[in-house]
Image (cartoon, rainbow, N blue to C red):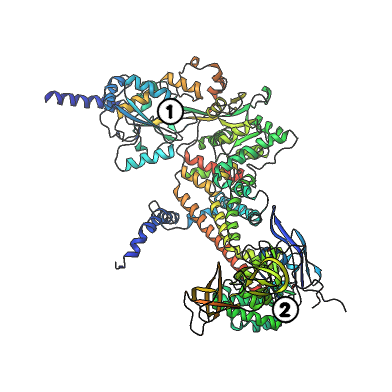
């Protein structure tokens, strides 16, 4: 049985502009039907990476393979990749209908086939009575759905979404997020999603690739990245965390204020761990080791800023029950195990890809 | 009281006797009576003999005057550096000088005249007459100014077909010529006749430049010259009839065979010769070495050579049969306030020393017939049309209506082909 | 402060009043003069206007005026559009080029005409230089096609049009062409089906401005054009020298009418093309 090819393989793609490296050699893959997100702050190189995958920019080095075929030097129109842009990029001088049909006309599909696909995608994107309108007559959310429809109708090997929800307000973003996910599940299309919003990435992806300053920091499943980050950057990127210096002895780490915590992997020497606030719970205890410095009520949760000796911690727990007061002494209970963060945030070639990224043999 | 009455009646009798010498210096140049608004000068009594005696004190009372000049090819230094300083020194009368193009100055004069205001200038050296002749003082300047005594009569009484009888006194003579580069055109090749010119052009295609009659005077002058030479005497007479109107012109030009040889000549010539966009265009082609022979103005060519815009081997000549020349002149507006000073100035501009100065300096021909040739240096003389040819070579122009009809016909019969 | 019905007209008066005075009135005089009405008129007649079409020299002059405005405009389009597109990209020396190509904008058209005369005409600078290698310049001044005139006009029109069209192309959102290409359109098809229609308002504006600007060209045809036929602009000046105001009004009015017709034709043509593109999608 032939080995199944990945939908997309990016091998050591890099880009420099007159001596400045915009993107270090980067590799990633998307397997068939997978939803992979590239996550990072602005300037991290994700747009550069994107442009090389779509073919708008030529890479300085490396290869791009689509379903095993080398498309590195192919122009965008010859790649079977459909893009949904942050700005929607709907053609203003064409109706919604003609926007959607544009790609099919370029492909020279038969009229019957065009109509079939068109009606299908209009149905699943909920564009029923909008097809006759022009982009400027649509709301932001409607435009986004048209952009999506225009991409989906191509039935591409890879669907690429470039921060598609960034231009929308929070409420719309959430509902469209759900729609996108639902669409992905029903179409089963291999999807590469780019965003700077970590909650979006976490809620939608099968796998996340975290990038910063032109290189991949870490990649893995959302849950693993959140609970067991390998890199400091990843830990800090996914919301609140406490970075605590520890002394490791075998499978046990000693906390700076005393107390121990089991480690996932044996180690020896000084290090740092990431403790999520929700892993800490506090109880009123007159002889507790910590003192409450600040109380923040967030609706369903309460955040406590704690002081233990020289260290500050943030904890988070449900807000039912009486809140503790500032200045009260508490004891802190830590749940779960911890992973030592790597000393550097950079995943160098010598350390290899992190354990969670799938191998290039595609053995899923 | 009685003395005054006597003096008055004496004056009237004198005036009547004066008037009895018909077509006399003291009669209006046109119209029934003098049209000047400045009454300080008794025009009916003014003669060449008493000119200075009467006018100098009156002019000094005016004290100041304004003179306009249009922009002739000759530089305005003729006025600024030569004539005006001499005048101011001689009489102590200040002259305000402005150079104003004819098609700007004449409308200004017209506007002032229509509003009954005094004229903006007391004298105007212009390239055209006002449309309403009464805007000119109808004084027979030619017969009154002492320095005008030797004016060439052919130039003195009529300008471009309009008979002003001396109200417009010629100042700057001009002459259309054929210019050629003597270093390229050998002595025996220099055309003497229109046929010679045609032959030269046929033998040297592209080397003859003809100014378009629609774009420059050297071209319309050339057209006039050809017409004068090639048409029958009868046709020429009808053509030169200064009283011809639109209908007569149309009849002659478009509905008779008179101009046929003219069109034929030009059609032949322009097969090989180039037609240019103006007087200076022709000279520039000669300067570039593209053309060896061209239609030109004598004074423009002169100033070009002086200004190193043409090589100093360029010479000018007039073809057999003659080429038109004329003279622009100056007039006094009828509504001037400084009539005495203006008259004095008009006399000054015709003084022999000034006329010689401008001839030597700028090939500005003098309308005076008795200008001493010795006043002109040799190096200037060689750039002018040789005196013997000049004497025979000048012909006059038809009236404006006729000229326009001829030009339009040229466009239709020659250029359009 | 309560608004009265007079407020708006009063506020508009300085601006609109100025326009009426300096533009509207002379226009009215010119048109009414050409129809025989007005101060020196002989009564309503269409003959003055008709003469422009009936008399050979005027009719040919009108053709020349149109030729000197339409030909350079079309030729400029062919240069300006690719040039505008080139300027969207980055290439070595782009900044310098961006500045240099605009230089002709600052140079008056009469100066440009003199430049052509001095440099390119036969016997001019280049001709003398080329003589050394045995070549010579073709006749482009005073020639029957007015090549020198067209060149001099082009030299000034190209930066003008390019500037406007580059602005039009630059205003197109950056994602448009990548979007079209990702949907399978080649670079050329993306240009024709997306970029050009979106830039069309700018292209139209540039074309019309260029045409209208050129129809009154005086300097270049006067210096460089053939001696006959003369465009109406030169004939109008000649008529002024002769005081023939009726001719001036008539020529001017005909130029205005013809300009409007050409503009109308252009609008009709582009509207249809845009419609066509809209349908094609």
- Looking at this view, is A209 or B23 the one in front? A209
Above/below status of C15 relative to B79:
below
Looking at the rendered structure, whether the residues under marks 2 and 1 are on a common chain is answered as: no
Q: Nearer the viewer, mark 2 or mark 1?
A: 2
Q: Which mark is residue A82?
A: none
Q: Is residue A84 visible?
A: no
Question: In the rendered view, does A216 fall on the left or right side of B377?
Answer: right
Q: Position of residue A247 (x, y in %)?
A: 66, 68
Q: Secondary structure at mark 2?
A: loop
Given the image, what chain letter belongs to the residue carrying mark 1? Answer: B
Which residue, given by chain and number where applicable, does mark 2 sit on?
A189
Alpha carbons under labels 2 and 1: distance apart: 99 Å
- Tell me the quarter of the image containing the N terminus of chain B: top left
Question: In the rendered view, does A320 fall on the left or right side of A244?
Answer: left
Question: In the rendered view, does A30 fall on the left or right side of B109?
Answer: right
Above/below status of C73 relative to B6:
below
Which residue, given by chain and number where applicable, does mark 1 sit on?
B170
Given the image, what chain letter belongs to the residue carrying mark 2? Answer: A
Q: Position of residue C170 (x, y in %)?
A: 60, 59
Q: Position of residue C263 (x, y in %)?
A: 55, 60
């Amino acid at each position: 049985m032939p080995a199944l090819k990945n939908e997309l393989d990016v091998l050591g793609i890099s880009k420099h502009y007159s001596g400045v490296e915009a993107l270090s050699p980067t590799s990633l893959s998307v397997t068939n039907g997978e939803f992979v997100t590239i996550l990072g702050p602005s300037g991290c190189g994700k747009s550069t990476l994107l442009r090389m995958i779509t073919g708008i920019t030529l890479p300085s080095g490396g290869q791009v393979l689509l379903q095993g075929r080398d498309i590195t030097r192919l122009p965008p129109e010859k790649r079977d990749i459909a893009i949904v842009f942050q700005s929607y990029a709907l053609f203003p001088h064409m109706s919604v209908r003609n926007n959607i049909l544009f790609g099919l006309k370029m492909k020279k599909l038969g009229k019957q086939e065009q109509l079939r696909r068109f009606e299908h995608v209009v149905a699943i994107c909920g564009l029923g009575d909008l097809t006759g309108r022009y982009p400027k007559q649509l709301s932001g959310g409607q435009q986004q759905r048209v952009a999506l429809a225009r991409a989906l109708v191509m039935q591409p090997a890879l669907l690429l979404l470039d921060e598609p929800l960034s231009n929308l307000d929070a409420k719309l973003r959430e509902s469209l997020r759900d729609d996108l996910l639902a669409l992905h599940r029903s179409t089963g299309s291999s999807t590469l999603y780019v965003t700077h919003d970590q909650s979006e990435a976490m809620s939608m992806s099968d796998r996340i690739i975290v990038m910063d300053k032109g290189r991949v920091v870490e990649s893995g499943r959302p849950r693993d990245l959140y609970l067991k980050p390998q890199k400091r950057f990843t830990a800090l990127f996914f919301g609140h965390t406490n970075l605590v210096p520890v002394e490791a002895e075998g499978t046990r780490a000693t906390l700076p204020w005393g107390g121990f915590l089991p480690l996932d992997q044996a180690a020896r020497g000084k290090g740092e761990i990431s403790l999520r606030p929700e892993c800490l719970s506090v109880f009123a205890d007159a002889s507790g080791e910590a003192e409450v410095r600040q109380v923040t009520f967030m609706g369903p949760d309460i955040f406590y800023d704690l002081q233990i000796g020289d260290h500050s911690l943030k904890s988070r727990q449900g807000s039912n029950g009486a809140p503790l007061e500032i200045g009260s002494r508490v004891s802190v209970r830590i749940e779960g195990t911890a992973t030592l963060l790597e000393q550097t945030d950079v995943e160098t070639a010598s350390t290899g890809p992190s354990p969670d990224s799938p191998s290039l043999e595609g053995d899923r | 009281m009685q003395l005054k009455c006597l003096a008055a009646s004496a004056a009237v009798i004198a005036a009547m006797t004066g008037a009895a010498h018909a077509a006399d210096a003291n009669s209006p140049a046109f119209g029934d009576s003098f049209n000047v608004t400045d009454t300080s000068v008794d025009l009916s009594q003014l003669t060449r003999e008493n000119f200075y005696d009467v006018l100098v004190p009156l002019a000094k009372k005016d004290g100041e005057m304004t003179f306009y000049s249009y922009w002739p090819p000759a530089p305005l230094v003729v006025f600024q550096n030569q004539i005006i300083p001499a005048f101011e020194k001689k009489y102590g009368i200040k002259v305000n000088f402005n150079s104003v193009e004819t098609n700007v100055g004449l409308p200004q004069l017209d506007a002032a005249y229509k509003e009954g205001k005094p004229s903006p200038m007391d004298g105007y050296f212009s390239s055209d007459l006002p449309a309403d002749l009464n805007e000119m003082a109808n004084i027979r300047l030619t017969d009154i100014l002492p320095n005008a005594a030797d004016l060439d009569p052919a130039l003195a009484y009529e300008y471009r077909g309009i008979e002003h009888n001396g109200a417009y006194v010629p100042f700057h003579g001009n002459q259309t010529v054929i210019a050629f580069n003597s270093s390229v055109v050998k002595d025996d090749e220099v055309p003497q006749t229109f046929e010679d010119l045609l032959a030269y052009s046929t033998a040297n295609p592209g080397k003859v430049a003809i100014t378009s009659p629609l774009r420059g005077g050297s071209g319309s002058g050339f057209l006039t010259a050809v017409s004068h030479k090639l048409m029958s005497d009868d046709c020429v007479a009808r053509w030169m009839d200064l009283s011809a109107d639109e209908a007569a012109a149309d009849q002659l030009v478009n509905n008779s065979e008179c101009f046929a040889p003219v069109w034929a000549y030009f059609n032949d010539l322009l097969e090989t010769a180039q037609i240019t966009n103006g007087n200076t265009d022709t000279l520039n082609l000669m300067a570039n070495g593209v053309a060896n022979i061209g239609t030109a103005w004598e004074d423009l060519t002169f100033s070009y050579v002086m200004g190193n815009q043409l090589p100093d081997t360029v010479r000018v000549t007039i073809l057999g049969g003659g080429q038109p020349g004329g003279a622009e002149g100056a007039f006094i507006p009828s509504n001037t306030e400084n009539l005495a000073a203006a008259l004095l100035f008009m006399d000054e501009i015709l003084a022999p020393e000034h006329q010689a100065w401008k001839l030597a300096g700028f090939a500005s021909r003098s309308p005076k017939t008795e200008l001493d040739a010795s006043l002109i240096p040799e190096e200037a003389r060689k750039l002018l049309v040789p005196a013997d040819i000049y004497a025979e070579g000048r012909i006059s122009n038809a009236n404006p209506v006729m000229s326009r009809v001829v030009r339009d016909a040229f466009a239709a019969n020659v250029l359009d082909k | 402060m309560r608004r009265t019905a007079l407020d708006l007209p009063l506020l508009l008066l300085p601006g609109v009043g100025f326009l009426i005075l300096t533009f509207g009135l002379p226009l009215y005089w010119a048109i009414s003069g050409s129809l025989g009405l007005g101060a020196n008129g002989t009564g309503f007649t269409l003959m003055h206007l008709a003469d422009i079409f009936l008399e050979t020299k005027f009719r040919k002059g009108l053709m020349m005026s149109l030729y000197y405005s339409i030909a350079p405009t079309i030729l400029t389009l062919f240069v300006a559009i690719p040039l505008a597109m080139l300027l969207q990209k980055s290439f070595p020396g782009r900044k310098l080029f961006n500045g240099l190509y605009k230089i002709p904008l600052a140079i008056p058209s009469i100066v440009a005409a003199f430049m052509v005369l001095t440099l390119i005409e036969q016997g001019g600078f280049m001709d003398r230089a080329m003589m050394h290698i045995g070549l010579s310049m073709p006749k482009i001044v005073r020639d029957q096609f007015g090549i020198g005139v067209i060149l001099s006009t082009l030299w000034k029109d190209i930066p003008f049009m390019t500037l406007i069209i580059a602005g039009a192309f630059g205003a197109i959102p950056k994602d448009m062409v990548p979007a079209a290409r990702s949907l399978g359109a080649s670079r050329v098809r993306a240009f024709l089906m997306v970029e050009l229609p979106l830039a069309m308002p700018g292209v139209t504006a540039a074309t019309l401005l260029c045409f209208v600007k050129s129809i009154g060209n005086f300097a270049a045809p006067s210096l460089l054009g053939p001696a006959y036929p003369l465009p109406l602009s030169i004939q109008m000046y000649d008529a002024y020298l002769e005081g023939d105001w009726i001719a001036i009004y008539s020529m001017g009015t005909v130029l205005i009418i013809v300009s409007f017709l050409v503009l109308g034709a252009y609008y009709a043509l582009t509207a249809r093309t845009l419609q066509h593109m809209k349908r094609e999608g």
